[in-house]
Image: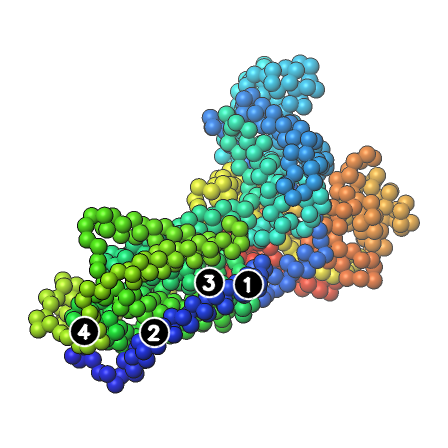
Amino acid sequence: MTSSTHNNNKLTARLAARLERNSRRVIAGALVLTLLLTIPYFLLRSDAEASQDPAGEVFDLRDDIDERFESEIHGSAWIFESRSGDILTRDGLLEILENSQALRDADIRGELAPERLPVQPYLIDRLNPDTGRTIHGIDTLADAVDEVFRADPRLAPSLADATDEQVKFVIHKLFSDPRSAGLREVISVKATSERRIVLGQEILWWVAPALLSFNIADNQKLGGGTQSIGLGASETILDLEEFNRNVQEILRGDQVHNRVWGIAIDVSLESEDQGAIAGIFIMFTVMGAIVVVGIALRSYWAMALTGAGLGILMVWLKGLSNLIGLEGGLIIELIVPVAMIALGVDFAVHALKRYEEEKLLGLGPRRAFVVGLGGVLGALALAFASDGIAFLANTSSGIESVIHFGIAAAIAVASSFIVLGIVVPLAMMEIDLIRSGRLRRPGWLASVGRVFLSINVIIFSGVSVVFIIARGVIPNGLELVILAVTIGLHLLLPLYLIGRRPVIVADKTAGTAIRSDGRPKDSPLVQFVTALARWRYIVLPAALGVTVAAGIFASRLEASFDVKDFFSSDADFVVSLDKLDEHVGDRGGERAIIYLRGDFTDPAAIATTDRFITSLAQNSYVARDTTGRPDVTESIVSITRRITTSDHSRALAEALTGVAIVDANRDGLPDDRAGQKAVLDYAISEGVPLDEERLVLTAAQVREIIDYPGEAGVQTTIFMVGIPGTRRQEVVRAARDALEIDLAIFDETDAISVASLTGSPFYRQAQLEATTDA
């Protein structure tokens, strides 16, 4: 639209004219508002993060579990992968053995302590009920192999003195002995075996590319809390993850023969690391956006104003968000600023370009602003309104972080429209008025100076914006000092120096409409767009067809939730999950939590729970070991059966409670309520014995499984089931459906009032469904 066709009675033209008449008041008002917003920016900052959890049973059960159960042990899993393809060799196992001992020694010296926690040992000793071995902080197959060498005088004195053949011989002995056959579960699913004659005996010669191990530490010393994997900014979570990283550093050692990964040991710290990388990219985004403005408008002043405007935008976003009580989080801290930069630069380029076009047609700065902004203000306002409404639609979500994102993004759109769509063009007009008729310095030195200032404004603007986004990286407040210096050096100081130059030509044309008689030649882009308009009967149906096709394919798009979408594919956190899939496969998986509430002194409740666990062997979505048994952790059933079937344990329970525990049908479960109560009373107070000297589970570990207030109260119990392949949401949905069918067995007894599912896979499913529904 040219000025000859401009309708001065249009609302946008009248608004533009009013802005032009009050330009300095508007600019001053924006600066004053920015200063005022620094008050909530500093004083009302909240360290809380908006919850990413919608309302729902899985989260209610999670909260109940967090309240009732607290783990005594902080455990981490490790994958050791051989560089040669076979870890079951002398060199491969010896490196694991030496690094494991180095870990124990470092713990004694207090070297595993997180920075905020006391320097003290954190590793603990516990019995592994699956293998019958005592875990001294960490237990690996290498430890078991070394113990066999040290105990058998016919073999080498230790693993360090052994040959590969002797190692294969010992591994065969361990895997074939029923007492240690559980060690077979720790090697990779890709392991192979063949029969060979070694040391005069036929053995199974095992080859495995990797093995799995666990370490255990005192959870209370590390701050307590439940064993859950998820994003969080609490000091307790960060301390746990720092401890895990300290363990990983020692277990890795020089990694001459093996590579080591901790499985999902540091999701929050990894998130912080990735966020720091994202901050650098945001800085380059700002710098790139300013370069685009400079190329599009070929103006240093447009670049400087846009850079300053983006910095002011971030202050507005932070200040207004703090003022209305929005909480932080990755979505608000990273996604909203990027959207703000994109929208703000878009507003600035459209408004400034339209202003420059009117100047090229002969209008002075004031008139060019009125005509240019009047012509584009309607489109900018429409973009602002439509984007703002779209973002505010997120407030209908059931997820707090999405609601806060919608509000913050709407604030960002409004701020971008005001600052970069209105105030920046006004400031550009004022700059042109100051420069109009002033002597301009010719020569190469002035050109070099402009290039230097342009590079400076790009760098300073990017740095100031990224430090405002990532508050706390530098001393608080310094980021605003950088922004103020950016504005002072690249706008105020140059304008002051220009203002001191003499006026050589009076700007008598300012505010008048002087047009060139010649019409500039249309650019190729204008010619292309005009051609599209002429062929509208072809273009519009084609666009409709593409839209319909895109809609069909979009409806087939499967929503997914994979960590690879949120972290770098080469991050240790992601690689560890890939290695878990590769080497553990269907023998293990992410834990689903079975949550049961009822009267577990009733034998019917225990019997029904036992039938449920047995039925899991037929559930194709449940992980199972090499023998086909489902991957189920210790439960109220296994605890009851361990005490009932052991003469030693049963006698202790009977002596403590004075009740005879009868199992006439020999199913390993007490036949009556009194016997079942006696078992629970003993387990809760004394633990679960393995023999006369050792406990399979301490009393504290039993209380991690059973919340047992006594006969008059309602008992709650949990146990976990491994589900492979939960990185694919279709697997999570199918597994949930299958497990809910199995849980229907509890409808057959009145002793169980609640039987349900929760756990990390179902948290993500609920979050994803709530997000897509929003």
- Tell me the CA gap for discs 2 and 3: 22 Å
In the picture of the structure, the residue carrying the numbered disc 3 is 315
**Residue drawn 57% across the image and 64% down it:** 44
**Residue drawn 89% across the image and 47% down it:** 656
In the picture of the structure, the residue carrying the numbered disc 4 is 509
Residue 493 seen in the current view: yes
Disc 2 marks which amino acid?
Ser
Quarter of the image where one finds residue 377: bottom left
Q: Position of residue 483 (x, y in %)?
A: 43, 57
Disc 3 marks which amino acid?
Val
Label 4 SS: loop
Is residue 9 toward the left or the right of residue 723 in the image? left
Disc 1 marks which amino acid?
Glu
The foreground one among 319 and 79 is 319
Outermost left residue = 518
In the picture of the structure, the residue carrying the numbered disc 1 is 327
In the picture of the structure, the residue carrying the numbered disc 2 is 23
Label located before the other in sequence (4 or 1): 1
Label 1 SS: loop
Q: For the residue carrying disc 1, how many other residues have a C-alpha within 10 Å: few (<14), some (14-19), or many (20+)?
A: many
Q: Is residue 320 above or below residue 20?
A: above
- Tell me the CA gap for discs 2 and 4: 19 Å
Q: Looking at the image, do the residues carrying marks 4 and 3 touch, with CB atoms under 8 Å apart?
A: no
Q: Is residue 76 above or below residue 595?
A: above
Is residue 140 toward the left or the right of residue 300 in the image? right
The foreground one among 60 and 332 is 332
Report the mark closest to the observer, 4 or 1. 4
